[in-house]
Image (tube, helix red, strand yellow):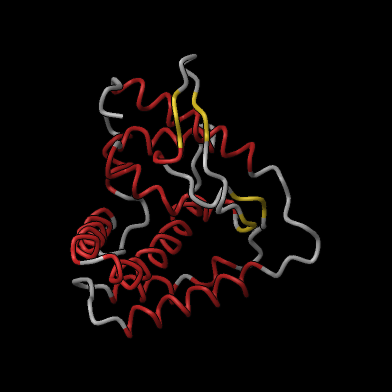
Amino acid sequence: MEQLTREEQYFYGFEAGKILKEIHKIPAPQGTEDWEISFNRKADYKIKMYLECPVKYENGQAFIDYINSHRHLLRGRPRTYQHGDYHIGNMMIGNDRKLYIIDFNRNDFGDPWEEFNRIVWCAETAPLFAAGMVNGYFDNNVPLAFWELLALYISSNTLSSVPWAIPFGDSTVQSMLHQGKEILRWYDNMTHPVPTWYKGVANQ
């Protein structure tokens, strides 16, 4: 990604957003469990894992508080096909200069907006790519409701990252702690739903 110009980073992010929109046109099978029930169960489990974990984020409670005060946003959300691990690590630029998506082995069915919970990896590496992805998905008309719900999904994911990292050793734990600190900075301790990396790109 570093080899690309700023314009190319944004362009490929925009393409990634458009591709993701196509992926999400595949509906979930009939009879799939209601998303609100499903995700609340997942969030409760991740909160429990975090609270029982010996390693904590500085002000990790902000993630828990945000989840608990925004659970109502899960009500009535659709379920569609998901790639399951959608970020720049699972994308390639071919010799034809087109963007290709790989590694569908974590595919699932869920709220299409939850798919953006891995965008933190993109935002850390290339904020322009991340911003382009959001804008491409929404055709440059991003609703505030998306940001509010995405902050919930990122909070839930971040809580489980430290317990997940412990078996992989201290360097992985430190990496997750650093990422959690960055996320809290982007969201001003989860008090503003639009992250600073997006606002910074939008204002350029």
The quadrant where residue 6 appears: top left
Judge left or right: residue 34 versus residue 136: right
51 vs 184, nearest the viewer: 51
Displayed quadrant of residue 19: top right
Q: Residue at x 47, y 49 (%)?
A: 116
| Image quarter (top left, top right, bottom left or bottom right) of the C terminus | top left
Q: Position of residue 195 (x, y in %)?
A: 32, 50
Residue 123's spot in the image, x, y percent? 32, 43
* Residue at 32 percent of width and 58 percent of height: 192
Name the residue furthest front. Answer: 168
On the picture, is 123 further left or further right than 78? left
Asked if 202 appears above or below 43 in the picture, the reply is: above
Q: Position of residue 22 (x, y in %)?
A: 64, 36
The image quadrant of residue 108 is bottom right
Where does the N terminus fall, quadrant-wise? top left
User: Residue most toward the bottom?
Assistant: 52
Please determine whether, in this image, residue 46 is positioned above or below residue 73. below
Question: In percent of the image, x 79 and y 66: which residue is there?
Answer: 31
